[in-house]
Image (spheres, grey):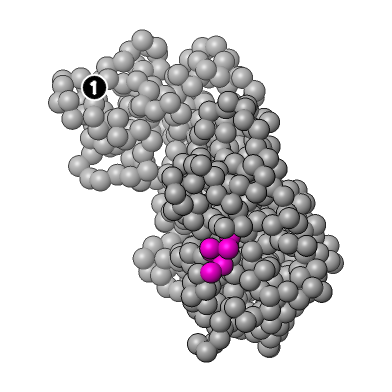
């Protein structure tokens, strides 16, 4: 049966919905996010400044003292106004300060050079809203539906009181809290506030309380993975004698020796699973990007429709891009071409590379060879049509890495098959399909083409499911009618799932646990504390 007939993307119904942008347009980042969420909670991609957690705790406490209504919106309005004063105060200091929410609008107000400055909401979503998830996950607060958040007595309240000791003596804040209609502040008052409320300078007592929440000495069961991730980052800083990077974490997690500390082996397994699913997501997105580029390069930008066989066929004819991608991974010699390679040839080469001197633990195979997930997804993002071949590599590499974990029902492996066939689960889709490809032993180019059709099908299924939830939101990049693909006039760029490791490293720096020289003396103390937690868990 021809590939084009074996996979039929759902036809698009013209609903009249508004065409909009969107994220995760293949739905394959979600499993990666689920894995990342279990390994590192309490921080998001939009929470760069850890001291905001302390300010939020204080705002909840201070609002409670005003006697105002137990109402979320009233509290949010109160918080947004005082937050604007904090941001304005920070920006009056004679030094560059980053990580402030609403800084652009605040600078506009300060640049007006007026005797007083407007103190009102700077953004639609203030920090008190943005930091809600991290604050709750770190056990500082509890969300109460449409009511004012509550502080947790053991963590949130002590933090709020520590901030209160400093801010209670600032007259401007007391006036703002007591006078809901006060919307102007003098520059001198803002400077006074900024001097004691610098977002980038955390007093020692606040720092200790924040660390007690982020890396607790007696964590809840769900917090142990977070403790392990921060321990891994601190361990890397100690070994490198430099500030580690996100890449260092993934390279080490996927490596033969992991972090070199048995207590961090489970963390290494978790971040390896993350890398496996991320490599799958990145390569499939790179395929979708190549498809869209080819469609939009067609006459009329593909708006009038292009035969899908023509698009995929054109991508497969760009043989040099496929050859280059495979050569960069060491899977093809200079004298060979993908045109003469079968699926089994590729599978055998990958398995030979990863089997030499390999070891297995917890159902996860590790090898000394450089053919690892970080190398794969980095190459996929710049491979053009070669992404179609690299998508096949990602599937085969995933099976080599974690097939045993899936089959043995490793406790952490369920996320590899999150939502089953809808997200190209390992158990439901990838492993069975690889067995079929092996049986059929077709040319690699045919298998790569089939995955391209499957990628478009995946996109249309995801966009259709989102349209069912909200009929006003159409995120489709293309539509399918019969064998024709119609562009929606939107380009697409592949990318990686945000791991939040960068933000976590930023927090470690702000908390003085790491610096340019690696781990600090305080960082070493926290690392020992984290190891004690992990050792207790291992002994249980």
Q: In this view, does 201 lie above or below 356?
A: above
* Residue 517 in view, yes or no: yes
Residue 368 or residue 198, whichever sits in front: 368
Q: Is residue 264 above or below residue 169?
A: below
Q: Give me the residue at 32% from left, 35% from top.
A: 103
Tell me if 55 is positioned left or right of 430 in this view: left
Tell me if 380 is positioned left or right of 1 in this view: left
Tell me if 449 is positioned left or right of 88 in this view: right
Q: State the residue position of label 1.
A: 117
Q: Is the magenta stretch mostly helix, strand or loop?
A: helix
Q: What element carries label 1?
A: strand
Q: Is residue 464 above or below residue 364?
A: above
Q: Give me the residue at 75% from left, 56% from top.
A: 6
- Magenta residues (range): 312-317
Q: Give me the residue at 64% from left, 80% from top.
A: 341
Tell me if 403 is positioned left or right of 308 in this view: right
The verdict on residue 25 being magenta is no
* Residue 226 in view, yes or no: no
State the image coordinates of residue 528 (x, y, percent, origin top left): 58, 65
Q: Residue 133: which quarter of the image?
A: top right
Query: Where, quadrant-wise, is the N terminus in this rendering?
Result: bottom right
Residue 484 or residue 221, whichever sits in front: 484
Q: How many labels does the image show?
A: 1
State the image coordinates of residue 415 (x, y, percent, origin top left): 73, 55
Q: Residue 516: which quarter of the image?
A: bottom left
The verdict on residue 313 being magenta is yes
Residue 25 or residue 268, whichever sits in front: 25
Q: Give me the residue at 57% from left, 21% from top.
A: 148
State the image coordinates of residue 326 (x, y, percent, origin top left): 55, 77
Q: Is residue 137 above or below residue 189?
A: below
């Amino acid at each position: 049966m021809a590939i084009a007939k074996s996979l039929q993307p759902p036809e698009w119904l013209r609903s009249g919905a508004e065409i909009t942008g969107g994220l995760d347009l293949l739905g394959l980042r979600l499993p990666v996010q689920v894995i990342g969420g279990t390994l590192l909670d309490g921080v998001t991609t939009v929470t760069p400044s850890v001291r905001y957690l302390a300010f939020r705790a204080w705002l909840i406490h201070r609002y409670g003292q005003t006697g105002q209504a137990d109402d979320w919106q009233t509290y949010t309005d109160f918080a947004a106004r005082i937050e604007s004063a904090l941001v304005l105060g920070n920006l009056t200091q004679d030094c560059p300060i980053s990580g402030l929410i609403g800084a652009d609008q605040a600078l506009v107000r300060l640049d007006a050079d007026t005797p007083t400055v407007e103190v009102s909401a700077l953004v639609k979503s203030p920090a008190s809203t943005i930091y809600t998830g991290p604050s709750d996950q770190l056990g500082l607060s509890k969300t109460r539906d449409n009511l004012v958040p509550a502080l947790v007595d053991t963590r949130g309240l002590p933090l709020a009181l520590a901030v209160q000791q400093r801010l209670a003596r600032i007259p401007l804040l007391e006036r703002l809290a007591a006078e809901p209609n006060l919307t102007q502040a003098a520059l001198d008052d803002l400077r006074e506030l900024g001097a004691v409320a610098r977002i980038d300078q955390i007093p020692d007592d606040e720092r200790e309380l924040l660390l007690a929440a982020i890396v607790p000495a007696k964590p809840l069961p769900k917090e142990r993975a977070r403790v392990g991730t921060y321990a891994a980052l601190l361990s890397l800083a100690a070994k490198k004698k430099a500030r580690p990077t996100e890449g260092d974490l993934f390279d080490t997690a996927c490596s033969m020796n992991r972090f070199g500390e048995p207590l961090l082996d489970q963390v290494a397994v978790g971040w390896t699973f993350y890398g496996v699913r991320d490599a799958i997501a990145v390569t499939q997105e790179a395929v979708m990007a190549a498809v869209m580029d080819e469609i939009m390069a067609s006459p009329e930008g593909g708006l009038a429709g292009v035969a899908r066989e023509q698009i995929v066929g054109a991508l497969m004819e760009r043989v040099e891009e496929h050859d280059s991608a495979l050569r960069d991974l060491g899977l093809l010699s200079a004298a060979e071409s993908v045109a003469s390679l079968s699926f089994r040839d590729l599978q055998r080469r990958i398995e030979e590379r990863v089997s030499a001197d390999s070891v297995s633990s917890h159902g996860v195979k590790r090898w000394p060879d450089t053919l690892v997930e970080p190398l794969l997804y980095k190459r996929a993002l710049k491979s053009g049509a070669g992404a179609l071949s690299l998508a096949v590599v990602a599937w085969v590499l995933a099976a080599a890495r974690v097939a045993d974990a899936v089959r043995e029902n490793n406790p952490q492996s369920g996320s590899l098959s999150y939502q089953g066939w809808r997200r190209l689960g390992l158990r439901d889709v990838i492993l069975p399909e690889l067995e079929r490809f092996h049986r059929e032993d077709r040319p690699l180019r045919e298998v790569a083409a089939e995955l391209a059709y499957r990628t478009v099908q995946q996109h249309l299924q995801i966009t259709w499911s989102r349209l069912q939830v909200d009929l006003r939101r159409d995120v489709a990049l293309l539509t399918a009618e019969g064998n024709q693909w119609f562009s929606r006039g939107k380009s697409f760029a592949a990318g990686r799932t945000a791991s939040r490791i960068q933000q976590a490293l930023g927090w470690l720096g702000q908390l003085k646990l790491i610096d340019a020289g690696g781990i600090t003396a305080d960082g070493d103390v926290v690392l020992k504390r984290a190891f004690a937690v992990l050792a207790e868990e291992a002994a249980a």
